[in-house]
Image (spheres, rainbow, N blue to C red):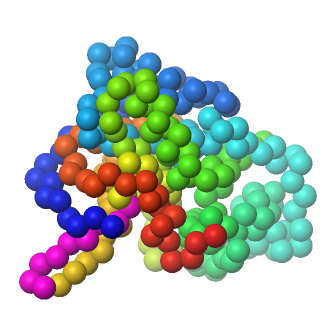
Amino acid sequence: MMTAVPTSGFSAFAVEPFPELQAGVDLAGAITGVLACTGIELQEGDVVVVASKAVSVAEKRYVDLAGVVPGREALELSARTGKPAEVVQLILDFSDSYFLATDKGPIIARHRLGFQLTSAGIDRAGPQGAWLLPVDPDASARALRDALIAHAGADVAVVVADSDGRADRRGATVISIGAAGVGPLRVTEYGGRRQEETFTDLIAAAAGILLGQRGRGAPVAVLRGIAYESSDAGVASMLQHRP
């Protein structure tokens, strides 16, 4: 766990124009390819923030909804929330518990990975399919970091970010679900008082201003100038309920 290191300012930019990703794509190669075309190089200490959907596409986490058979609970939840029964069934399949933020939803579920997420992180892929979260987001972040370092030759950190709603308000924010090379928790101390901060969530939220939402088309952002302690503890290490 890191003690706060001062960051007095940082810059951020989207990695774009980004190509449409196909299942099984070499994500590190796609990122460095776009950077090369724009004449930008990764630098020591950069934090590369990647939308979880891009990781899911690279890892082929697609589900054809035609093969999903909704059970009674899914059908009842579908009727209450208006969400397709097949998607609701996936939410139930990949979560340990759930509740409705209002009488009509959204469905807030605790994913089997330990995250509390709207719809258990299930992302629609048009009317026919859906994308699941990566199997192990921290492992995905480590693999991507290793590949980026090999490609770029710069020691960077990686945060996998996911768009998520909150039960107490409308709209979506961005949180971290995987990390490599950066400590997930930061400790601040002032006047003898100590406070833990979910540091990779702060990074993900900052990048979320740039990351693609609903067709924006920028699934990767780079944050430069952030002070952090290198760590591979991963986001799972700070969860209250670990799998």
| Residue 238 highlighted magenta (yes or no) | no
Quadrant of the drawing holding the C terminus: bottom right
| Image-quadrant location for residue 12 | top left
Q: Where is residue 107 in the image (x, y as percent from the top left)?
A: 64, 70
| Image-quadrant location for residue 22 | top right
Residue at image location 44% in from the left, 59% down from the top: 233
Residue 91 visible somewhere in the drawing: yes
Nearer the observer, 42 or 124: 42
Q: Is residue 19 above or below residue 3?
A: above
Residue at image location 64% in from the left, 79% down from the top: 99
Residue at image location 78% in from the left, 65% down from the top: 93
Nearer the observer, 55 or 83: 55
Quadrant of the drawing holding the N terminus: bottom left
Q: Where is residue 7 in the image (x, y as percent from the top left)?
A: 15, 54
In this view, the residue farthest toward the bottom is: 192
The segment highlighted magenta reads: 184-192
Q: Where is residue 149 in the image (x, y as percent from the top left)?
A: 40, 31
Residue 172 visible somewhere in the drawing: no
Q: Where is residue 81 in the image (x, y as percent from the top left)?
A: 69, 69
Left or right: residue 54 versus residue 15 is right
Residue at image location 50% in from the left, 23% down from the top: 29
Left or right: residue 159 versus residue 225 is right
State the count of labels.
0
Q: Is residue 104 above or below residue 30?
A: below
Nearer the observer, 232 or 69: 232
Q: In this view, does 182 lie above or below 114?
A: above
Left or right: residue 169 versus residue 207 is right
Q: Is the magenta stretch mostly helix, strand or loop?
A: strand
